[in-house]
Image (cartoon, rainbow, N blue to C red):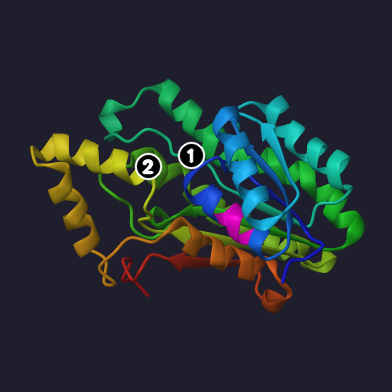
């Protein structure tokens, strides 16, 4: 489905990013994967190479640092000479109520969840526009539709990606560059475990009880596997999704029940 394509996947050393990278590799894509945890990233790269025989380049990059973000696109072009797919994914900002957060927390969240997306998009766009084709896929959160009480930074800053998706989809359609967002729900990752621990501490309950309660809130009765998010991303990156742009697609097991 993606043979001959080159994809960039950020925050790919573990969790959702790793799940996405594995599915894209299985579908035939060559990969540039990035993370600030280079030791874990190289292990992920080796795992994907071994399992799928894919070409994988690992790039150490902190998405809150402009010069390191620039190195991702540079590495992709040096290694493969083209970029067909950008899968923008990030780690989370810290949880907390509004009054618990500092100005430094807000500054970091804006860099992590918005400016890094702007920087990376600017870096890949000239190349995609010249070739008059490309896929921009932004992985974000169900908090765009259902803000969660203790995720103030995520609730507020991630909304900006919805505006970016809609704006870019309109502006880039003449160049055959398709732009979409993925609103992921609860996925079996270390991040969800951290949220469960935080909630357990606040409510004075065992973490196992919190994890059960979180799963019971989902109509399908379970959390997603990271690779299930990857399946959606792979579809959006493929020719099968050639008429889908400007969409914000939920993958949450039915958790967000709004129209």
The image quarter in which residue 235 lies: bottom right
For mark 2, give the secondary structure. helix
The image quarter in which residue 76 lies: top right
Residue in the picture at 67% in, 75% down: 241
In the displayed structure, would residue 46 be above or below residue 1?
above
Q: Which residues are magenta?
A: 20-24
Mark 1–mark 2 CB contact (< 8 Å): yes
Using the rendered image of the protein, determine whether residue 243 is visible from the camera's viewpoint: no
> Residue 191's mark?
2
Image coords of residue 8 (percent x, y)? 70, 48
Image coords of residue 206 (percent x, y)? 11, 42
In the displayed structure, would residue 18 be above or below residue 59?
below
In the displayed structure, would residue 105 be above or below residue 21?
above
* Left or right for 11, reference 190: right
The residue to which callout 1 is attached is 91
SS assignment for the magenta stretch, majority: helix
For mark 1, give the secondary structure. loop
Mark count:
2
**CA separation in Å, label 1 and label 2:** 8 Å
Which residue is most to the front? 50
Label located before the other in sequence (1 or 2): 1
């Amino acid at each position: 489905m993606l043979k001959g394509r080159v994809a960039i996947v950020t925050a790919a050393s573990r969790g959702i990013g790793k799940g996405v990278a594995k599915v894209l590799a299985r579908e035939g894509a060559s990969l540039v994967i990035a993370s600030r945890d280079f030791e874990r990233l190289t292990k992920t790269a080796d795992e994907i190479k071994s399992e799928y025989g894919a070409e994988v380049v690992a790039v150490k990059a902190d998405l809150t640092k402009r010069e390191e973000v620039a190195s991702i696109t540079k590495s992709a072009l040096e290694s493969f000479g083209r970029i067909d797919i950008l899968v923008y994914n990030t780690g989370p900002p810290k949880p907390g109520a509004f009054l618990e957060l500092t100005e430094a927390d807000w500054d970091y969240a804006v860099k992590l969840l918005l400016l890094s997306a702007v920087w990376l998009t600017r870096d890949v766009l000239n190349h995609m526009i010249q070739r008059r084709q490309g896929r921009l896929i932004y992985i974000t959160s169900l908090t765009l539709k259902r803000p969660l009480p203790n995720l103030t930074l995520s609730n507020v800053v991630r909304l900006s990606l919805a505006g970016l998706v809609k704006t870019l989809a309109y502006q880039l359609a003449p160049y055959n560059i398709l732009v979409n967002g993925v609103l992921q729900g609860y996925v079996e990752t270390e991040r969800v475990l951290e949220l469960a621990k935080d909630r357990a501490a606040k409510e004075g309950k065992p973490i196992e009880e919190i994890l059960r309660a979180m799963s019971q809130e989902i109509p399908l009765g379970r959390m997603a596997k990271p690779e299930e998010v990857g399946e959606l991303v792979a579809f959006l990156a493929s020719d099968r999704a050639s008429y889908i742009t400007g969409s914000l697609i939920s993958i949450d097991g039915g958790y967000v029940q709004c129209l």
